[in-house]
Structures are given as C-alpha cells and as structure tokens.
Image (cartoon, grey):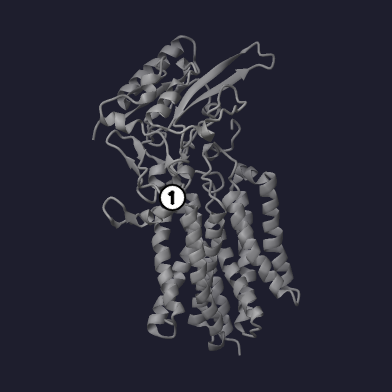
Amino acid sequence: MIDAPSSAWFTAHPHWSWLVVLYFFFGGLAGGCYVLAAVIDLLGRERDRPLARVGYLTVLPCLAISAVALIFDLSRPERFWHLLVEIHTWMPLIQLWTPLNAAAWVLMGFGLCAVLSSLGVRPPSLPGKVVSIIGLLLGLYVASYEGALLAFTSRPIWSETPLIGTLLVLTALSMAAAYLVLFGRWRHWELPGMRALQRIDAQALVVALIGLVALVVSLGDSARALLGAVNLILLAAVLILGFLAPLALRFRAGHVATAAALALGGGFLLRTLIVFSPQGIGQ
Amino acid sequence: MAEPMGFFTDTTVCIGCKACEVACKQWNQLPAAEGGQNTLSGDSYDNTRKLDGTHWRHVQFIEQFSEDRKDGRWLLMSDVCKHCVQAGCLEVCPTNAIIRTEFDTVVIQSDVCNGCKACIAACPFGVIDINPVSNTAQKCTLCYDRLQNGMEPACSKACPTDSIQFGPVKELRERATKRVGQLHEGGEKRAYLYGADEKMLGGLNSFFLLVDRPEVYKLPPDPQLPSRNVPMSALFSGLGALVAGAIALVNFRNRTKEP
C-alpha cells in the first residue's frame, strides 16, 4: 500500500454481499416504478392508466425484496429494528444525517404511499394526487440515496466521487421504464404510453452514460481500482450490455424487448460493479 | 467528563514480543481465529495480519533490507484503534451503538450493534470488523471496563518496553514531544509524531511515534471523515433526481399534446 493513490486505500471492506446488490437493484426499481406510475397518473392519458397501475403494484414486492435483502445482510438480522428504535429508551431513533437510518424511515413512508396507491388512492382525486406527489418525491429519494450511503464511508471509489447517486437514480428510471415496456409487451398492450417509456429509457441511458464517463474521470488516480480483471470485465459488460447495446437496438425494429431486457440487466450489472469494485483494496 | 485518556505508542522501542496482543485477547476474551488452527501468513513474523473483530492489537513487522540483506532495519509497531476525537465510525453508526465515553474514547456497544457494517467502511484506518462469535462489529475499547475500575488497559500493562504508554492524552503528548526531541538529538532525525495534533481528525487519542512515512506502517497519510463527502454527493444525487424527474415529466407531458 506504499504507492496507494489516496488515504481511502488504507480502509477495510465491509463485506457487503450480493444481498446489498439486490437491495440496491430492487430499491432502485421500486423508486423508478413509482416515479413513472405517478407521472403517468398525474399527467398521462386515461388509456395509459394500466401502466401506472402495474407500476404501483410492482413497488411493494420490490420494496419487500429490497428490505429483506438489507435485513439479511446484517450480521444480526433479528436486530434490524435497532435502526428504528433506541433500545435503551424505547424511543424512535431518528438521526437523519446517517443515510441508513434516514432510509429506514423514508422506506416506511414510501411503502405507505405504495400501499395507498395500490389500494386505489390515486389521481385525479385530491388525496390521490397528494399521495402520488409525496410518493414521487420519496421514490426519487429511494432511487438515489444509495449514492450518499456509499459516499458516507471512507472506501476507495465510493468516497471519492459524488456521482454514484446521480448514476443510480438515472439508471433506476431507465430500469423502471424498461420493466414497464417488457410488461406491456408481454401483455400485448398497444398503449401510447409505451413509446414514451421507450424514449424515457433511452434518454435516461444516454445521460447515465455521460454520468458513468464523468464518474470514472472524477476518480483520478483511484480509477486504477477499476483495472483489476473482474472490475474491468464488469465495467465492459456494463458499458456494452447495459448502455451501448440497448441504445443501438432501440433504433432497430423488432428489438424493443431485447433492448429493454438489456437495460434492466445493465442496471443490475452496474450495481454489482459499484458494490464490489472496492473489494480487495485496503486492510 | 473525566480527562481524555489514550495511548502513546513509541515504535522505536517495540521489540515485537506481541505481549500486547496476548494480553488484549486474554482480558477481552477474544476468540482464536480459525478455531485456533495455526496458519502462517508468510509475511515476516506477522501472523495476526490485521486489526479486526477478534484482533484489537496487531504488531506489524516491517522488514526494510537491501537485496543482499547486508544493510537494513526492522520497523515494529503495535497498531490499535486510534480513538479519534472526530470519529468516522461514530458519525455513521445508524443505531447509536457506538458511543464516546467519559474518557473521550470510542466504544461499540455489542448489545446495540446489529452488524450493518457501516462503521467498517467508515473507519479511515480499517480498524473495525465483525467478531464472528458475537456477530457484531468490534474493536479496541481502550479496556473501558478496566478504566472504569481505575486500572490501566491490558496491553500497555503487559508491554515490557513501555512502547505502549497509557495516560491522560495531554500528558502523553508532552512526553511524546520530548521523546522525539531526544531521538533527534541522538541522530534519528526521521522520528515524528503521527496523529498527536488536532490537524488529524481533531487528534488521535491513540497516537504514534514513527520513523518512516505513514504508508510504510499501513497508516493513511491524510485520513478524512466520511461526512466530508456527503454534501457534494447529496447535491449530485439531487441533480440526478431532478434530471430523472424532468425526463419522465417531459415525455409524458409531450405525449398529452399528441392527437
């Protein structure tokens, strides 16, 4: 470590497992789905309402998988409630400056919005509008806060760029759009909103691709952490399968479903790369 | 609050006996690694390898020799939690399991910790890890139980050369400064203190006298608090969320104008 590019390289890896990748992936998908469902509900046409309904109904299972993954990644899963309750006083534990504690509370609020929306509290009713707008904002938070969670460490890459959250929220939107496109194709829906979702997927991917390049550049000398064999293969897979291929296929007729599946898979690969890239560096 | 207490580790008098490691393990009832099976690291006499949940003291053996081995020196250092005045682990803990004691030391409450591992990634020195027996994050407590009973920590008590000195931090700093002066007068101009002043994380309550660059001792030259990164990260995450929201809004807003 004598030639380490920064002090972050002297820290230890937290042994976060695949469960954290699942937590990020399904959390992002939940956030993205709610955002799109709420936008469709608030601004879209009546004919696109089925897409919004699928979006809302997808949020709860995704959140459940995400929460279970987070809980089982704890070394003491039976103590997950220590995130919410101060065990010596039995008072609610609110310290919103720690991303994990803030996320625990936000996820509860977001879950409540998802339940209400799934039960039919939806626009155009006023309570439905209020729930959708609050849920939309919480959804954006859920899709992006993992960037702050990773930045709130001393690890290489995670603590050395502010762009991880940007990348996560943009790809969460792309994943959610891709998922809804896939669902619509599976059900043979010919809804006008399907084309808008494809556009959203492509636009979010283009901005995220710029974000990914900026992220690698912002790492400076620490970018050499990405030059290990596994990280390099993952980075290439993310770039080719997750970004370039779906963007290229979008302009070819008959490949809409393949492009959407690749965008969804690329989102998973990107999260895998982000979680595991600093592994093996440090103490 | 009692006076801040800490360690001053003078690496120039460490003989690598590992009495500190043994005393720490014994007093804190820390389990053996791999069920007590003896595995050699191949890295000099260092078979402890690193600080973690079951090794709260770690004696490093650094061999600096020329290729023909005619010229060189040993650097020995007993590493430990730095009990930072501004502690990264303490600020990230989402369950309040990590506390600052009346002795200005940093202690993980094992009954509160749920093993989220945030503190492992936050510690700028890579000190903390999961203890596989308790399945909670653990590290040196500066023998909090002994301090509460007016006793000295086990490691410094066991150190036969006074390489590890325990006491009020203010007093230790004075002693350490004199020792550096003494070494400089004796010709060892490379001696300096690592973490003794407030520039490094508000001061390390466990600080060191070193005779080479911090990196040689696997110490970060410029450790930082994790919270330093959050404002920029939150700003860019917020910008990303704005762009994502705008992309969704624009596409469905445009679409409503379609015939």
Q: Quadrant of the C terminus of chain A?
A: top right
Q: Is residue B238 above or below residue A38?
A: above
Q: Residue at x 39, y 78 (%)?
A: A130
Q: Residue at x 48, y 71 (%)?
A: A60
Q: Residue A75: horizontal and vertical position, in percent?
A: 46, 48
Q: Residue at x 46, y 78 (%)?
A: A118
- SS for tag 1? loop
> Few, some or many C-alpha atoms within 10 Å of disc 1 (few <14, some 14-19, many ≥20)?
some
Q: Residue B129: horizontal and vertical position, in percent?
A: 47, 40
Tell which residue pokes out farthest to the bottom in this image: B259
- Viewer-closest of A136 and A116: A116
Q: Quadrant of residue B134?
A: top left
Tell which residue pokes out farthest to the top in this image: B186
Can see residue B196?
A: no
Q: Is residue B178 above or below residue B200?
A: above
Q: Residue B173: horizontal and vertical position, in percent?
A: 35, 23
The residue labelled by disc 1 is A76
Q: Quadrant of the N terminus of chain A?
A: top right
